[in-house]
Amino acid sequence: MDASRQDYDLDELDRRLIHALQINPRARWAALAPIIGVDAVTLARRWERIVEAGIAWVSGHPGPELRGPSAILEIEAHPAATLGLAQEISADSEAFTVDLTAGGREMLVLVATSSMDALTEYLMTRVPALDGIRAARAHLFTSPFVDGGQWRLRSLSAEEIAAVERTIEVSRSPRGRVDSQMEDQLLRLLGSDGRATVAFLARAVGVGQRRVRDAVAAMTAQGRLDTRLDMAKAQSGRPVHAWYFLRVPAALVQRVGSVLTRIGEIRLAVSTVGQYNLILAVWLLADVQRLEAVLEEKLPGVSIADRSVVLRTVKKEGHRLNAHGHTTGEFSPLLTNMPQSNPCFE
């Protein structure tokens, strides 16, 4: 399986399909077929191969209205202990992304918890107890400007992008309240497979298909469900993954954030409380210096205080990855700020 995952190469049709699912992750194959230019059966078969290879995957995560406090954790570790430490941290539900890096830190961990008390407990108790850590610094999230789910391939034309956008279903009653237990069940099921069918979800939850369809649409409209496609960096056409740590005058943070939304290489941009007040994650073709020149040109008064290049991602948005950046099939749901009913599924 590992060999097949490593050897599978995307062709242009695969990339067009992935780009379409980045725009509408739960789009019906029949709706995408005339846009992409092949039949629905071919699209379904292609997607199955891509998922089986671990190259791309769709997940449903708690939306902004359900997310608890988050932080970026910088970890300095003894080199011999770094990989084992990353694997241990990846087992924590609180750590939803774990990157091994070269630069001023050996590891960057994106942490999310259900409450500020839980975040404090994790940072003050769990992290210091880990063997091999030399130092750790946390940067609390304040305002996100760019999220990884907004990053796109460039395989569809502007007209095709607009056509895919028109396939997005809008809830007929976006203000309707979804039962909390049902909401929790749907989040757990969609976390491991964001394209799970309405029929499958209805059977698992034990309600009718129309109710599930309306619930998923309402949760999305209310910012309680964020369905997104992620993919292996090596297959993205942007093989260099880097983190930037910026210092921005307080009065300029909002303006700088709006500029960053227009730079296509940026996957994550978030204002933080800590040594740096704006942190970026970027995927690049190769030239790190070119992006830095663009940032300096577009953002006068902003200084790049530090940067790190990612050597390997061990965990991404709850999904464990292998050494090639492909999914292993192991997934842990992201934590939310609502009480968990801990349902059990067969």
Image (spheres, grey):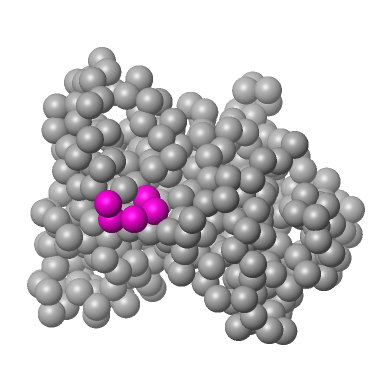
The kind of secondary structure the magenta stretch mainly shows is: loop
Q: Is residue 290 left or right of residue 343?
A: left
Specify the segment rendered in magenta. 113-117
Q: Quadrant of residue 169?
A: bottom right
Q: What residue lies at 88% left-to-right and 59% top-to-bottom?
A: 39
Instruction: Please tell me in which quadrant of the rendered image residue 164 appears.
Output: bottom right
**Quadrant placement of the C terminus:** top right
Residue 266 appearing in the image: yes
Residue ID at (63%, 58%): 181
**Place of residue 200 in the rendered image (x, y in percent of width and height, measured from the top left):** 81, 52
Up-down: is 265 above or below 106? below
Q: Quadrant of the N terminus?
A: top right
- In this rendering, would 100 be left or right of 272? right
Number of marks in picture: 0
Left or right placement of residue 16 versus residue 40 in this view: left
Percent coordinates x, y for residue 111 in the rendering: 34, 47
Q: Is residue 151 above or below residue 158?
A: above
